[in-house]
Amino acid sequence: MLIFITGGARSGKSRYAQQLALDRSASPVYVATARIWDAEFKQRVDRHQQDRDHRWTLLEEEKWLSRLPLAGKVVVIDCVTLWITNFFSDLKYDIDACLAACEQEVKGLLQQEGQFIFISNEIGMGLHADTESGRKFTDLQGWINQSLAAKADEVIFMVSGLPLKVK
């Protein structure tokens, strides 16, 4: 099962996903995809971690989601945007290579037959990037979001803390 939750920054995506996972499991798994690149971002991650208590198992994985042993578990993957960024950077902004890698990882992950809750930032609702790499990333994120939404059993769009069921 795949649930896809998208919305703007600070729209309540993570809080909603975590509650959804706790409603489905007494011991959900949280997969963090972030790379810590500076002190301010580390503080954000620390605040995020404080939202989860002893019931959670934390796994940190920047890219290779399909390698994690997650069969039969309820899993929150937070977040797709950072996950894609890791591929985008490591693959030197090659959109085709990034798309292929992300699709392969999702395919492998879903073969484990767990309940996967993907969190992603909705793209294209703000300013257009003023660099080529920024525009490429916008394209990449849009395509990955569309792919996840198409595969999803449920799609939720978060607006100001309110979940709107789209699919």
Image (tube, helix red, strand yellow):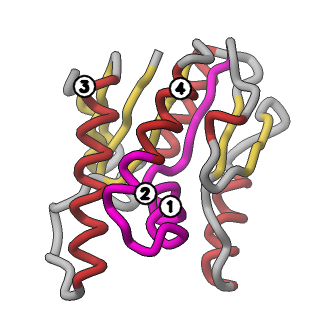
* Quadrant of the image containing the C terminus: top left
In this picture, residue 72 sits left or right of residue 105: right
Q: Say what secondary structure mark 3 lies in.
A: strand
Marks 1 and 3: CB-CB under 8 Å? Answer: no
Residue position marked by numbered label 3 in the rendering: 165
Q: Name the residue type under label 4.
A: Phe
Q: Name the residue type under label 2.
A: Thr
Q: Sequence order check: which comes first, mark 1 or mark 2? A: 2
Q: Quadrant of residue 134?
A: bottom left
Residue position marked by numbered label 1 in the rendering: 87
| Mark 4 vs mark 1: in front | 1
Residue position marked by numbered label 2 in the rendering: 81
Looking at the picture, does residue 50 appear above or below residue 118? below
Looking at the picture, does residue 166 appear above or below residue 158? above
Q: Say what secondary structure mark 2 lies in.
A: helix
Instruction: Look at the image and say whether residue 27 sits in the magenta stretch.
Output: no
Q: Quadrant of residue 25?
A: top right
| Mark 1 vs mark 3: in front | 1
Q: Nearer the viewer, residue 46 or 113?
A: 113
In this picture, residue 55 sits left or right of residue 91: right
